[in-house]
Amino acid sequence: MPEAMVAARPSEAADGTVQQVDVAVVGAGFAGLYLLHRLRKAGLSAVGLEEAGDVGGTWYWNRYPGARCDIQTIDYGYTFDPELDKAWTWSEKYATQPEILRYLGFVADRYDLRRDIRFGTKVTAAKWDEKAERWQLTTNNGAAVSCRFYIMATGCLSAPKPPEIDGVRDFRGEVYFTGRWPHDGVNLAGKRVAVIGTGSSGIQSIPVIAEQAAHLTVFQRTPNFALPAHNGPSPADRRDLFQSDRAAYRAQARQSMSGVPYPQQTVVSWQLSDAERRERFERAWAAGDLVHILTQLWADQAVDVDGNKIVQDLIREKIRAAVRDPETAAALMPDDHPFGAKRPCLETNYYATYNRPNVTLVNLRQEPIKAITAGGITTAKRNVDVDVIVFATGFDAMTGAIRAVHPITGRDGKSLTDVWAQGPQSYLGLTVAGFPNFFMITGPGSPSVLSNMAVSIEQHVDWVVDRLKALHEAGFTTIEPTETAQAGWNRHMADCSMLTLHRLANTWYTGANVPGKVQGLMPYTGGVGPYRSICDEVVSRGMLGFRLTGPNVPAQCNDGEVVRLQPDVRLVLNLLASLNLPPIESMGAAGARAFVNEFNKGRPAGRPIGDIVDGTLPAADGPLPYRVYKPATPGPHQVVVYFHGGGWVLGDQQSDEPFCRDMVRRTGMMFVSVGYRHAPEHRFPAAAEDGYAATRWISEHLAELGGIQSPVLVAGWSAGGNIAAVTCQLARDRGGPQIAGQLLVCPVTDSSFDRPSYNDNATGYFLTRSLMYWFWDLYCSPDDRTDPRVSPLRGRVSGLPPAFIVTCEFDPLRDEGIAYAEAMAAAGVPVEQLKAHGHFHSSFVMVDVVITGVQGRVQMAQALRRFAGLAPEVRSDERTHGHVSPGDKIAAAAS
């Protein structure tokens, strides 16, 4: 764009008058421009307030050498107008900053948006006027603004972080910031240059600066993972896919996890051979696509330490091969965070740059900067003379731009800065309780920087403008989230953070790069498509979580939490609902067994362990099958007798295999899973008596099985939890065997259906009330249901082994499990409970599907080890077979 067009527009007025509009928008980047377009089409008057001299937002300020986007440009643009999509063609796979700025200028011209923008104008104060129900804004240039709705479109990465090094003001040379690069460029030819920081802007600019400078010294505190961009024309395969059906391509992007239309991977790392994993990695490395390598290698790369470490090691190989000096290569290899937990960078000749004779890397972890002097930089080991210092130290991300623009004062004089003193709080990342008619586009609590920003911006803008239009049509003049809804969203954010490995890194995602900033994962990690569906659900449920008021209509407040399930549980249940499966109870016993067996084929098989051995054991009415799951460490091992779930009707000794494998890995114990007889062929008390007989036999044959000669433990899930509980009672009453402890996961403990959880969770959570009725009818006649061998809650509960009982919030069996734990505790039995928030009946056995169940299984494993008199956690040498890996600290945090 010609520089003449970057001159600041004069304000509408300079005489103290107030500009009255429906909506004020701060920012004229991707979000601000689309807002102005949508607001105009909705019939709302609006003004854009932009500190810069022209449109562009982040791309107006970030003009440093080598600046490019890191999302393929075929995906990085507006999609709201198919004609616009056709009118602009990007010249490269990853467009440069000048081209992106030209694109935004093209959009502003196409829709005549500049006439609604006051350039060179910064808001200096914003206050909610309770009486007028309007935001009153003052600015540094021209008329104040009075608006009904106030929208922050300030961007997530637009507030540069100031340097934190003593002596910056003493430096007599030139100082530049990548986030505020001079518009007319910088001549670095023949100069000694220092670049401080190796995040995205550093990695992009360092190769270009190295080509210009006489000498370049890079000061690196934290190495980052960087991948080759392989820039050039848009890849033909992706271009052809896009052009074959543009509408479908864009629709898939909106429903995807990242905002880029890639499918969800289902294969997990341990299902692939080393050769297969390497082939996938090399293909992704050659593609030069950040989203591809972050999502398309294997399903567990972003959620599991072991699956992620494979990627880390492969990238380190690439760094080692690219950088000639081994010490420099080692310094450039990240070892303190999982791949993807910090935003990886796309690079062009970055690693090769360190082979140049005019480039030096200073590892600040070994020699931190002590001060900046008049002539250079002093570290713990050396003095570096420089003429130019470039700070590539990043941004005060997500919240910085919102809080730095001006003080924002909401209802009752509350300051947003004070409200966010302990970290940002929001509802949907869009609104904040106590700040009526205030919206943020891609604010903290939304997918924002963990997504294709273009897709997330459009979704946010569409949602906000559609709501403003609907409010007007319904006669409402204010909208504000409730404290309940906001607190619920913050809990959901915390739940989502447990899905990924982002929690294991100190990054700008968490605010760790800004001294004094309260740390917490700010972007929503649940995915673009799921987030969109949640926003739509808020609307479909009558603006759930919002209070709406107006002068001539009754106030409306449909309070509540939009998401109470764990995020991955919600995805699983939505998937099951989309399959429109007939009720299991309608299939008959044989049909239900066939269905469950087929269903189990599609799940991850479970991770490698030491050995799996099948056998049979004698029982009064014939042999029972069993399967032994052994740890990889040398035996003998403590033995856990395990009973599978399935309502006494379904399943066998291998149906809970992923759970058994996972618990073997976490406990270091041997699990013997018993296949007991099933109803309706074998009704009560067949399963109960089989469970006891199997436990007694296993206890008598421990050495033969490879077990330690010590009391066994028992464990079970669902109906298997019932059998485990009954077995403990029978062992007490029949003189043995001795049992060291019991793990009951979502157990059936009573035949009563009148507890609240049977009504609260009657439908919608896979295990339904109707299905439980069917199980009971097949297993046990009503006359027998008070027998303690079927309803252990009705038996004597004193004198039982210590117990760890797991219940799930969204499970018909929740209350009877809690009742059993409370009854045992009252009888003097040592009992621990895990009341799993947001989980459903199958959460903990859906290993590597419901990732948020990991911490619960960790607690189960620790309890079993305590019952056996062992240290709560498996030792690191048990986990790594005696080898200490660089990621041990990360693994320990994620276990």
Image (cartoon, rainbow, N blue to C red):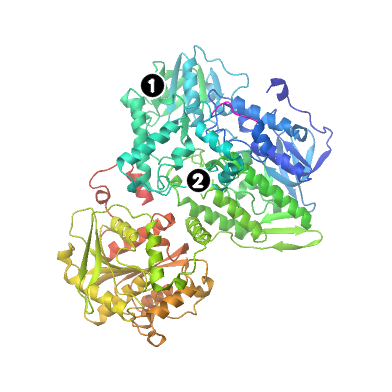
**Image point (79%, 53%), residue name:** 131
Above or below, 186 against 670 in this view is above
Secondary structure found at label 1: loop
Residue kind at label 1, given as amino acid type:
Arg
In-front residue for pair 106/265: 265
In-front residue for pair 748/393: 748
Q: Which residue is mark 1?
A: 382
Above or below, 888 against 495 in this view is above
Q: Is residue 120 left or right of residue 603?
A: right
Give the mark nearest the N terminus, 1 or 2.
Answer: 1
Is 389 magenta? The answer is: no
Image spot of residue 757 (x, y percent) = 50, 73
In-front residue for pair 485/583: 583
The answer to which image quadrant residue 559 occupies is bottom right
Residue stretch in magenta: 88-93
Above or below, 269 against 783 in this view is above
The answer to which image quadrant residue 177 occupies is top right
Q: Are marks 1 and 2 in contact (CB under 8 Å)?
A: no
Q: Which residue is mark 2?
A: 519
> Mark 1 or mark 2, which is nearer to you?
2
**Image point (31%, 59%), residue name:** 663
Question: What predominant SS class does the magenta segment belong to?
Answer: loop
Secondary structure found at label 2: loop
Residue kind at label 2, given as amino acid type:
Gln
Image spot of residue 422 (x, y percent) = 55, 49
Question: Residue furthest toward the bottom?
Answer: 783
Is 92 magenta? The answer is: yes
In-front residue for pair 343/776: 776
